[in-house]
Structures are given as structure tokens and as C-alpha cells.
Image (cartoon, rainbow, N blue to C red):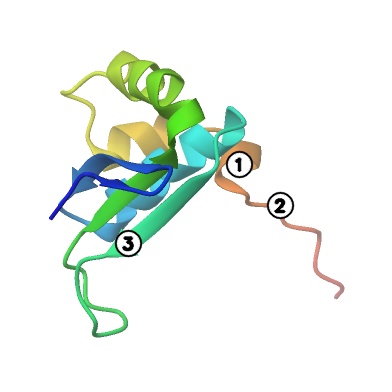
């Protein structure tokens, strides 16, 4: 299989869906369009994911992911990202 499909390039493969989602959100927060390809046809199966980016964003995406330490695991990356970066709105107080 080719690492390039039309103007999309295979950027990275992650062993878990969470790792892929975290890195995809990091790229999206930097203005890069990302496409995720699940490695399993079974919904909910945590078999990993491949990130694809457009050719115009490839160098910047590689630089951004290269800046993330290879020793950084998903939990550490979660700790580093703000709620806004993760797309989580702060909880509103619940009425009594």
C-alpha cells in the first residue's frame, strides 16, 4: 500500500485510538486538516489508527509531531493539553 493517496500522505500510525486522537487534535489545533483511518472495521475496537494529512501540511505536521517527545505517552500528553485543546468545555454548575 502506498503512503500517498492523491494529495494525502500517511503521517503516522498509533497503536491505540486514544494516541491517534490526541495527536490528531494537536495537529488540528495548529490548523492542520487530519484524516483518521481506523485499523479495524469493528466499531469500538481499540486496534490503532493511521493519521493522514494533505501534502501542503506534511512538513509542518511532521515538525509538530517530531516536537512531541517520543517518551510522551498518552497520559502525559493528556496532562499537557488544556481542556480547550481537547475540545472539552468546562462543566457548568448543576442546579440543585
Look at mark 2 in the image and give the residue it sits on: 89
Q: Earlier in the sequence, mark 2 or mark 1?
A: 1
Q: Which residue is drawn at 66% across and 40% down?
A: 84
Q: Which residue is drawn at 33% across and 25% down?
A: 65
Q: Which of marks 3 and 1 is in front?
A: 3
Label 2: how many Cα within 10 Å (few below 14, some 14–19, many 20+): few
**x, y percent for residue 17:** 29, 59
Q: Distance between the residues labelled 2 and 1?
A: 7 Å
Q: Is there CB contact under 8 Å for labels 2 and 1?
A: yes
Image quarter of the N terminus: bottom left
Give the secondary structure at mark 2. Answer: loop
Closest to the observer, 91 or 51: 51
Look at mark 1 in the image and give the residue it sits on: 83
Find the residue positioned furthest to the bottom. Answer: 42
Q: Nearer the viewer, mark 3 or mark 2?
A: 3
Q: Which of marks 3 and 1 is nearer the N terminus?
A: 3
Q: Residue at x 32, y 54 (%)?
A: 18
Q: How far apart are marks 3 and 1 (CA)?
A: 24 Å
Q: Quadrant of residue 37?
A: bottom left
In the displayed structure image, the side of residue 85 where residue 49 appears, left or right: left
Q: Quadrant of residue 83?
A: top right
Find the residue positioned furthest to the right. Answer: 95
Give the secondary structure at mark 3. Answer: strand
Q: Residue 93 carries which label?
A: none
Label 1: how many Cα within 10 Å (few below 14, some 14–19, many 20+): few
In the displayed structure image, the side of residue 88 where residue 49 appears, left or right: left
Q: Earlier in the sequence, mark 3 or mark 2?
A: 3
Give the secondary structure at mark 1. Answer: helix
Look at mark 3 in the image and give the residue it sits on: 37
Closest to the observer, 75 or 61: 61
Amino acid at each position: 500500500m502506498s503512503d500517498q493517496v492523491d494529495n494525502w500522505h500517511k503521517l503516522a500510525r498509533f497503536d491505540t485510538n486514544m494516541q491517534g486522537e490526541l495527536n490528531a487534535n494537536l495537529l488540528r489545533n495548529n490548523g492542520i486538516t487530519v484524516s483518521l483511518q481506523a485499523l479495524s472495521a469493528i466499531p469500538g475496537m481499540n486496534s490503532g489508527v493511521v493519521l493522514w494529512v494533505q501534502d501542503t501540511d506534511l512538513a509542518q505536521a511532521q515538525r509538530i509531531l517530531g516536537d512531541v517527545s517520543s517518551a510522551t505517552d498518552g497520559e502525559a500528553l493528556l496532562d499537557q493539553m488544556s481542556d480547550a485543546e481537547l475540545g472539552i468545555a468546562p462543566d457548568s454548575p448543576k442546579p440543585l
